[in-house]
Image (cartoon, helix red, strand yellow):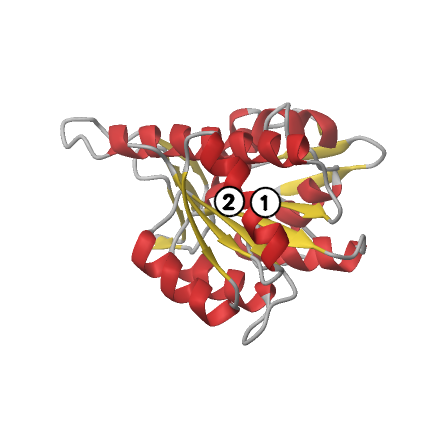
Amino acid sequence: MPETILIVEDELSLQETLAYNLKKEGYMVETVGDGRSALEAARRLKPDLIVLDIMLPEMDGFEVARILRKEMSTAILMLTARDDEIDRVVGLEVGADDYMSKPFSMRELMARVKSQLRRARLLREEMGKSKDADTPHEKLTFDNLTIDLTRREVTLNGEAIPIKPKEYELLLFLAEHRRQMLSREFILERVWGWDFIGDSRTVDVHVRWLRQKIEEDSSNPTRIVTVRGGGYRFEG
């Protein structure tokens, strides 16, 4: 079955251009032009990827992403008309996986779409394997913190904590390289992929989220520590 992409864009000419080019690549595409319709379509379609504009009628893209991220792990690629750092940071904080500033080339958009869909496929394959009842649970345990590799679940003091797919991937990568200094660039390449078109601030944002969830005092972290001028080190 072809993968499904939901385009949420109120500018009709851009909406049609995106739909035309994505359909040419063999994807199933549905388009909507406002935030409320985006929520309805996403819940109905369960798409593989959502291309989401920020400036929308009814409800802006930030709110749409915030709501959907609580309900599903579908990859979200946000579009912004401004090359503004605050838009990018807020987009990541509400759960977007990537962002692009308008205007952009169709070639770059296609590259990012393919990158996000490829990572989504790998995640589905891993989750499918974890559902095998005969597979023993593999776990990494660090005092009161446990990472369940089979369930893709993180528990603290025996209680499961809410964690986004990319946060889980980052935590697992850090844990697998315990007490090693990992540069932001290396983390970005290995967790987000070599073809991710972003910068190292993406890593910083996700580390901050993780600290808020697994550190006793996120302002004075002891598990994920910052290496000055280098990157991060997981102490366990």
Residue 110: x percent and y percent?
59, 32
Quadrant of residue 91 within the rendered picture: bottom right
The quarter of the displayed image where residue 228 is located: top right
* Residue at disc 2, secondary structure: helix
Residue at 26% over, 28% down: 129
- At label 1, the amino acid type is Thr
Q: Residue at x 67, y 49 (%)?
A: 205
Name the spot of residue 156 as percent of width and height, x first. Answer: 42, 52
Q: CA distance from mark 1 to mark 2?
A: 5 Å
Q: Is residue 69 left or right of residue 100?
A: left
Q: Which residue is mark 2?
A: 19
Instruction: Tell whether label 2 touches label 1 (CB within 8 Å).
Output: yes
Residue 65 in view (yes/no) = yes
Q: Is residue 232 left or right of residue 77?
A: right
Q: Is the residue 100 above or below the residue 174 in the image?
A: below
Q: What residue is shown with label 1?
A: 17
**191 vs 32, nearest the viewer:** 32
Residue 64 place in picture, x, y as percent: 51, 65
| Above/below status of 175 relative to 20 | above
Nearer to me, 65 or 225 = 65
Which of the image's four quarters has the C terminus? top right
**In screen coordinates, is 213 left or right of 141?**
right
Q: Is residue 221 left or right of residue 4?
A: right
Give the percent coordinates (x, y) of residue 99.
65, 46
Residue type of the residue flagged with mark 2: Ala
Q: Quadrant of residue 89?
A: bottom right
Dot 1 lies on which element? helix
Q: Decide: few, some or many residues near mark 1? Use Cα within 10 Å; few <14, some 14-19, many ≥20.
A: few
The answer, for residue 92, to whether it is visible in the render is no
Q: Residues within 10 Å of mark 2 (few under 14, many from 20)?
A: some
**At 62% across and 53% down in the image, what residue appears?**
13
